Amino acid sequence: MRKLILVALLVALLLPVRVQAQSAIHFSTVRVEVWPEFDKPAVLVIYHIILAPDVALPATVTLRIPVKENAVAYVDAGGALMQLAYETKEEGGWTVLTFTAPTDSIQVEYYDTLVTDGAARHVIYQWPGDYATDSLIINFLQPLDATDLKLDPEPVSNKTDANGLVQYQIDFSSRAVAETATLIVDYQKTTDRLSASLPQVEPSAPLDNNAQGKVSLSAYLPWLVGGAGFLLIVVGLVVGLNYWRGTGQRSGGRKRHVAKREEGEADQAYYCPQCGKRAQPADQFCRTCGARMRRDE
């Protein structure tokens, strides 16, 4: 009997410690992206979670999501997404994710079921309230070809991208522990086209490099470098050819001018002013009589 009492007291003492450790973690902001029929006929849900500044790192986090297929990552100091190891278990109809985050920025992705009935589409998203958060915002991206869109609750703002898709923002403000938040969306759609098929639409932060719609600059880098090198060669050839032509013309002109001047000088005759004998252009005195040559006469 005494052993049972001791065990009960020990459990009672440990339980508050566990609850306190769980409640010690809270979120500064949670931004939830809800994108139906984005890159597959399902609902893509992306959590962008920022831990509160007073949460000690690394922090062990436990989140409930409605499906088994998921991905977990954290954002490193350089802003890159790094995959994060996690454990799962089934509990009360939820898949429970447990992981240890080395930084205060966490990302979780999963695909939820899209309810369809002919052209009618129905989406339900629920924030389970595992932790308190100072700010909970849900962004709903209108699917391609969707009409008669209805959101509950009403969005506080919206913006339209270059492809005409509208993103609606629903602000749930702060949420306490166990305080849920639910978004219900209905719309009509008669096509199977996905939003990711549009060239300008991309996921905000995919977890890998193989996501549909992502364009990698490295794939085109060799072509860009090769094209730049070819252009430099062409420019160099044009400049060199123009320089060679200009140099040749100037050199030829000088040669012709000198030749003409020398020819003129050769045709001019010089005569001695004293005896009249012909003299050479370079003579200073007459070779016959010795008189001084005077060329200015």
Image: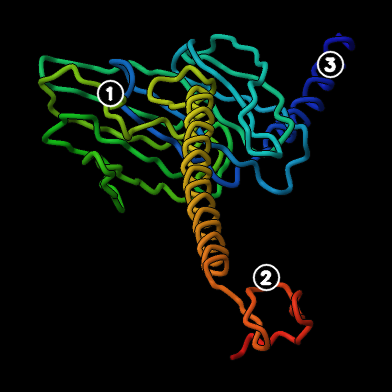
- Amino acid type of disc 1? Ser
The residue located at (51%, 27%) in the rendering is 226
Q: Secondary structure at mark 3?
A: helix
Q: Where does residue 86 sit, x and y in percent of width and height?
A: 65, 16
The residue located at (45%, 51%) in the rendering is 173
Q: Which mark is residue 123?
A: none
Q: Where does residue 291 sit, x and y in percent of width and height?
A: 76, 86
Q: Where does residue 69 sit, x and y in percent of width and height?
A: 48, 11
- Amino acid type of disc 3? Ile
The residue located at (41%, 34%) in the rendering is 33
Foreground residue, 229 or 90?
Answer: 229
Question: In this rendering, is residue 227 above or below 43?
Answer: below
The quarter of the displayed image where residue 66 is located? top left
Q: Earlier along the polypeptide chain: callout 3 or callout 1?
A: 3
The residue located at (86%, 8%) in the rendering is 1
The crowd level at tag 1 (other Cα within 10 Å; few <14, some 14-19, many 20+) is: some
Q: Earlier along the polypeptide chain: callout 2 or callout 1?
A: 1
Foreground residue, 286 or 62?
Answer: 286
Q: Please state the total of marks drawn on the protein image.
A: 3
The quarter of the displayed image where residue 215 is located? top left
Mark 2 = which residue? 280
Q: Secondary structure at mark 1?
A: helix
Foreground residue, 158 or 92?
Answer: 158
Mark 3 = which residue? 5
Quick check: marks 3 and 1 in contact, CB under 8 Å?
no
Q: Nearer the viewer, mark 3 or mark 1?
A: 1
Marks 3 and 2 sit apart, C-alpha to C-alpha, by 142 Å
Mark 1 = which residue? 197
